[in-house]
Image (cartoon, rainbow, N blue to C red):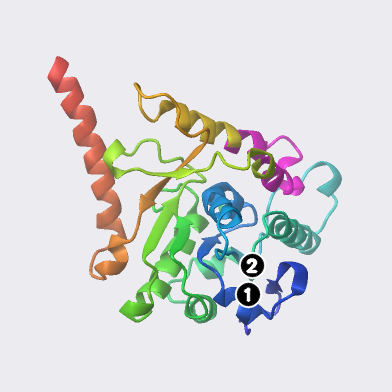
Amino acid sequence: MKLSNPQADIFVPGGAAAPEQALARVTHLCLGAHQDDIEIMAHAGISDCLETPGKAFGGVVVTNGAGSPRTGPYAHLTDEQMQGVRRDEQRKAAVLGRYAIQLQLAHPSSVVKTPGHAGVAADLATIFGGCRPEVVYLHNPADKHDTHVAVLLRCLEALRALPADRRPRRVLGCEVWRDLDWMVDTDKVALDAGRFPDLALELLKVFDSQVTGGKRYDLATMGRRSAHATYHTSHATDKVTGITWAMDLTPLLSDSSLSLEAFTLGYLKRLQDDVQGRIRRFA
Ligand SMILES: [Zn+2]
């Protein structure tokens, strides 16, 4: 497998298969901007693959994780050393979650923000061309992290460049920075993130360089899943113990003329109508 950046990391946990073979097995594919995004977004997909024989999870981290804050035992590390730490943490997550393959493309964040960047496009074409996933987990377009939205856009460009019969059947935009509880209920896709709770916590804690220093992404992510499970309907009892909300991005593939901006603003309009309608009903 050829990836464009010399720093890119191709990792097959267990090393039993060639990367091309491991990628070809992937049925649930998640592409995130940074190390740890996959484990925050796609625990439901990781769980599906652990539960179902024949299913295989693949993880892709698009950036090199440079410029992350560092404290405590990591305070003295250079940016390059820190990138190595984060790469190793992501590999550990891939082992814990029994991923079929973990790819880290190692692109600088600035490069990912460039529309049509040749290296990013080539890597994503290699990945999407090398597997036939049933479901692809991406960032959602209402995320408030610039790099997350840029990675989503690059992924959509690559997916739209595939022949129609090679496109995944389902593409979901998942929550990391800014959750998706604000969507109206009929727009929400509920991903069951309450399975394998011990593993879920381990998969978040493995990113020690991010959690150390007080950013408790592990506790926050578990808490968010739990809160979503309780607050999703006011009358029903909790059927699942953890939910990750997702936006169904599949219409963007079936209709290539649909802009991501117009598609996303539709969700905001439906939220506005919902809020306005309730106030007006009781005013
Ligand atoms: Zn991120």
Kindly identify the amino acid type of the residue bearing the numbered disc 1. Answer: Ala
Q: From the viewer's perspective, is residue 35 above or below residue 24?
A: above
Determine the main secondary structure of the stretch shown in magenta: helix
> Which residue corresponds to the image point at 41% horizontal and 41% vertical from the top-left?
180
Is 204 covered by the magenta stretch? yes
76 sits left or right of 66 in the view = right
> Which residue in the protein does label 2 denote?
100
> Which residue in the protein does label 1 denote?
22
Closer to the camera in the image, 232 or 208: 232
| Label 1 CB less than 8 angstroms from ligand 1 | no
Q: From the viewer's perspective, is residue 20 above or below residue 98?
A: below
Kindly identify the amino acid type of the residue bearing the numbered disc 2. Answer: Ala
The quadrant where residue 259 appears: bottom left
Is 252 covered by the magenta stretch? no
> Which residue corresponds to the image point at 43% horizontal and 76% vertical from the top-left?
116
Determine whether label 1 and label 2 are within 8 Å by CB. yes
> Which residue corresponds to the image point at 26% horizontal and 71% vertical from the top-left?
256
Find residue 245 and report its horizontal and vertical position in percent: 43, 43
